[in-house]
């Protein structure tokens, strides 16, 4: 799956097509066929289309994404944090959201702008992301 193809998708994509594309992105990432940056960009683009369906993403796919992003969560770079926060909020990923909240315990090692973005997102979402 080419990232330019993903970027050029129409705003509205059929649900079944999105499910297939999310699964494909997960498989490619697991098989080291795409980089973490391209994986996150792909998920971000697909999540934008998913929100336009006004449906919840199928739970098995959502859970796979949730577990994968939980493993990837680090607070090292603002852009990566911002992308993951957007995906987590828009897909309602509970496991990763919990990990995000726990990362605030390490606030003294997180860049201020990154910390502010995490805190702002948590405040906007509240306690129950689901």
Image (cartoon, rainbow, N blue to C red):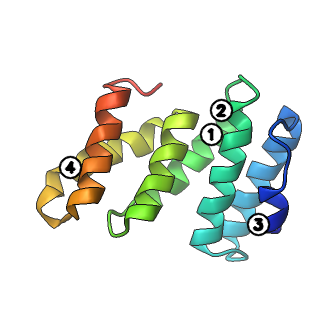
Under circle 3, the secondary element is helix
Q: Nearer the viewer, residue 122 or 16?
A: 122
Left or right placement of residue 66 versus residue 105 in this view: right
Residue at the spot of label 3 = 3
Give the CA separation, mark 2 to mark 4: 27 Å
Residue at the spot of label 1 = 62
Give the CA separation, mark 1 to mark 3: 20 Å
Q: Quadrant of the N terminus?
A: bottom right
Residue 91: percent from left, percent from top: 58, 36
Residue at the spot of label 2 = 59
Give the CA separation, mark 3 to mark 4: 32 Å
Query: Of discs 3 and 4, which sits in the foreground?
Result: 3
Task: Tell me if label 3 and label 4 are in contact, CB under 8 Å.
Answer: no
Give the CA separation, mark 1 to mark 4: 24 Å
Residue at the spot of label 4 = 104
Under circle 4, the secondary element is helix
Under circle 1, the secondary element is helix
| Disc on the earlier residue, 3 or 4 | 3
Query: Of discs 1 and 4, which sits in the foreground?
Result: 4
Mark 2 neighbour class, 10 Å CA radius: few under 14, some 14 to 19, many 20 or more: few
Task: Tell me if label 2 and label 3 are in contact, CB under 8 Å.
Answer: no
Mark 1 neighbour class, 10 Å CA radius: few under 14, some 14 to 19, many 20 or more: many
Under circle 2, the secondary element is helix
Task: Tell me if label 2 and label 1 are in contact, CB under 8 Å.
Answer: yes
Query: Of discs 2 and 3, which sits in the foreground?
Result: 3
| Disc on the earlier residue, 2 or 4 | 2
- Per the rendering, the mark at residue 107 is none
Query: Of discs 1 and 3, which sits in the foreground?
Result: 3
Q: Which residue appears at 74% of the width and 40% of the height?
A: 49
Q: Which of 65 and 10 is in front in this view?
A: 10
Mark 4 neighbour class, 10 Å CA radius: few under 14, some 14 to 19, many 20 or more: some
Residue 61: percent from left, percent from top: 68, 42
């Amino acid at each position: 799956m080419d990232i330019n193809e993903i970027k050029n998708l129409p705003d509205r994509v059929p649900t079944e097509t999105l499910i297939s594309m999310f699964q494909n992105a997960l498989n490619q990432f697991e098989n080291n066929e795409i980089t973490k940056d391209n994986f996150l960009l792909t998920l971000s683009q697909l999540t934008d289309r998913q929100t336009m369906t006004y449906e919840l993403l199928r739970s098995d796919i959502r859970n796979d994404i949730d577990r994968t992003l939980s493993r990837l969560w680090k607070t090292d770079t603002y852009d990566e944090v911002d992308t993951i926060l957007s995906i987590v909020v828009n897909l309602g990923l509970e496991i990763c959201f919990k990990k995000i909240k726990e990362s605030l315990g390490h606030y003294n090692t997180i860049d201020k702008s990154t910390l502010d973005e995490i805190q702002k997102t948590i405040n906007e979402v509240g306690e129950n992301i689901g």
